[in-house]
Image: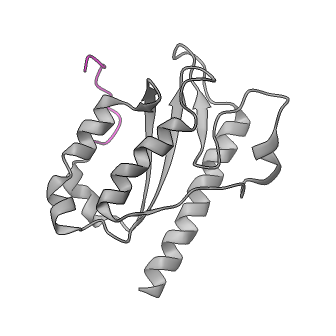
Amino acid sequence: MSAPPKSDVPIITSHDLAEADGFIFGFPTRFGMMSAQFKAFMDATGGLWRTQQLAGKPAGIFYSTGSQGGGQETTPLTAITQLVHHGMIFVPIGYSFGAGMFEMEQVKGGSPYGAGTYAGDGTRMPSELELAQAFHQGKYIAGITKKLKTAA
């Protein structure tokens, strides 16, 4: 969709998802929802859906928006439907990031649904606080994934 290729980023196919124990999906927001590129990726998972190969696997979501009103909560809310149809277990971070969730002195994306950042026109990089929240989310979901995998 007119985005330049990123040759240094590994590319997976939807069928590669069946090999994973859990997921953290990340994508930019377009008009308060996941980008069309990521939606197309999820649309390609029909075969996995039909056989429920992703059912019971934990999944989280992180995202970037162009502005404060750009979908920091609507994006994960609308993306959850993809997880639900696959039978995945949505793992929000809630307020487990502690005081960082209540920071009011600096610009910070994210919500109880997952880590986030404000990208603005694409030139703004995530702040240290946003990166810390994303790192927390990764550790948090990895821990839950490990517990579920061990219990199985």
- Above-or-below relation of 89 to 7: below
**Could you tell whether 126 is left or right of 95 in the image?**
left
Q: Quadrant of residue 50?
A: bottom left
Q: Quadrant of the N terminus?
A: top left
**Could you tell whether 126 is left or right of 82 in the image?**
right
Magenta region's main secondary structure? loop
- Above-or-below relation of 107 to 16: above
> How many labels, in total?
0
Task: Please tell me which residue is depicted at 71% across the width and 35% down the height of the picture.
Answer: 128
Is residue 81 in the magenta section? no
Q: Quadrant of residue 93?
A: bottom right
Task: Please tell me which residue is depicted at 59% across the width and 37% down the height of the picture.
Answer: 116
Q: How is the image coloured?
A: one colour
Which one is nearer the viewer's eye here, 2 or 96? 96
The span picked out in magenta is 1-11
Q: Position of residue 111 (x, y in %)?
A: 64, 43
**Could you tell whether 89 is left or right of 41 in the image?**
right
Task: Please tell me which residue is depicted at 19% across the width and 60% down the height of the picture.
Answer: 48
Q: Quadrant of the C terminus?
A: bottom left
Task: Please tell me which residue is depicted at 61% across the width and 62% down the height of the picture.
Answer: 140
**Could you tell whether 40 is left or right of 141 in the image?**
left
Q: Position of residue 86 (x, y in %)?
A: 30, 61
Which one is nearer the viewer's eye here, 2 or 110? 110
